[in-house]
Amino acid sequence: MNNFSSDYLNKFNLSEHVVIITGAAGLLGKEFARSLAQVKAIPVLADIKGELTEKTAYQISKETGTQSFPIQFDVSSKISVTQMVETVITRFGRIDGLVNNAALDPKFDAEHTDQYSNAFEDYPLELWNQGIAVNLTGMFLCAQAVAPQMLAQHKGSIVNICSIYGLTGPDQRLYQPEEPNLPRQYKPVVYSVTKSAVLGLTKYLAVYWGEKGIRVNSLTPGGTFNNHDEEFVRRYSLRTPMGRMGDKTDYPGSLLFLLSDASEYMTGANLVVDGGWTAW
């Protein structure tokens, strides 16, 4: 292999890179952490669910042979976020990446059939405020907290996890029960609004830190299978050009790209991985 090819391969190297993943105990958070461990990065799993986060970190470390580090924190609390970041800096002396993944996302699988209808007309203010605090303010706080260390390093990559519902309005037909007598279900307004705002925050920070070594991009996954019932999967798949829902393994490759020097001339961009959902 010649040196020219080796230089390009080296751009994908994330070995020993310290990367914080918020919401790391969730479906995608776990897979993001696992992918980082597989490429010999140092994933820091940060989540409010302490016991589950510790268990996840242990499993990933056992599977990959790469040490993963769990931290319990509250993404909506400035004090908690600051303490989490200080812990990482004290332990490793650097922060190379931040994956802003934590979010409240109402589920429509078999385990959540009794959820609130989420109709806009009577959507509770407390749920609106809670969604903004976690989905948006949490990203703001985490980016703010890691910035001094990344600025001191003159380098860092932040990836904000968005959603197709940050690009388009939810197709509410997907969520309606088959039985006409059952109450209607809706993807809630706060999810779409906060995910739309993620794109604005991404562009703002990308421009703000453009010449200072910190790159900020967003990654937009499509709907991801998580034990959904057959009817939902059928409806979703018909709505998608590639004819299927996303799998949790469909996104880590794109994340690794955005965190690595292979994307060193990308900032303020939104990488959409949705099976073509937004291409119609």
Image (cartoon, rainbow, N blue to C red):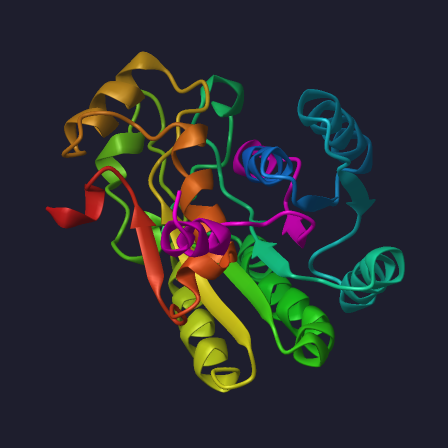
On the image, which quarter does residue 96 sit in?
A: bottom right
Q: Position of residue 121 (x, y in %)?
A: 37, 53
What segment is highlighted magenta in the picture?
1-30
Figure disc tally: 0
Residue pictured at 45% horizontal, 18% vertical: 227
Q: Is residue 273 left or right of residue 14?
A: left
Vertical relation: 32 (above or below) 155 = above
Q: Is residue 182 left or right of residue 21?
A: left
Residue 260 showing in the rendered view:
yes
* Residue ranking furthest to the top: 230
- Judge whether residue 25 is colored magenta: yes
Residue pictured at 47% horizontal, 33% vertical: 107
On the image, which quarter does residue 250 sit in?
A: top left
Residue 194 showing in the rendered view:
no
Task: Give 64 or 139, whichever is nearer the viewer.
Answer: 64
Residue pictured at 67% horizontal, 75% vertical: 147
* Residue ranking furthest to the left: 280
Residue pictured at 28% horizontal, 57% vertical: 167
Q: Where is residue 99 in the image (x, y as percent from the top left)?
A: 58, 54
Q: In this view, does 108 lie to the left or right of 60?
A: left
Task: Give 97 or 104, whichever is nearer the viewer.
Answer: 97
* Residue ranking furthest to the front: 2
Vertical relation: 92 (above or below) 29 = below
Q: Where is residue 190 in the image (x, y as percent from the top left)?
A: 45, 56
Name the quadrant of the N terminus. top left
Vertical relation: 2 (above or below) 232 = below
Q: Where is residue 159 in the image (x, y as percent from the top left)?
A: 51, 59
Task: Give 270 or 131, whichever is nearer the viewer.
Answer: 270
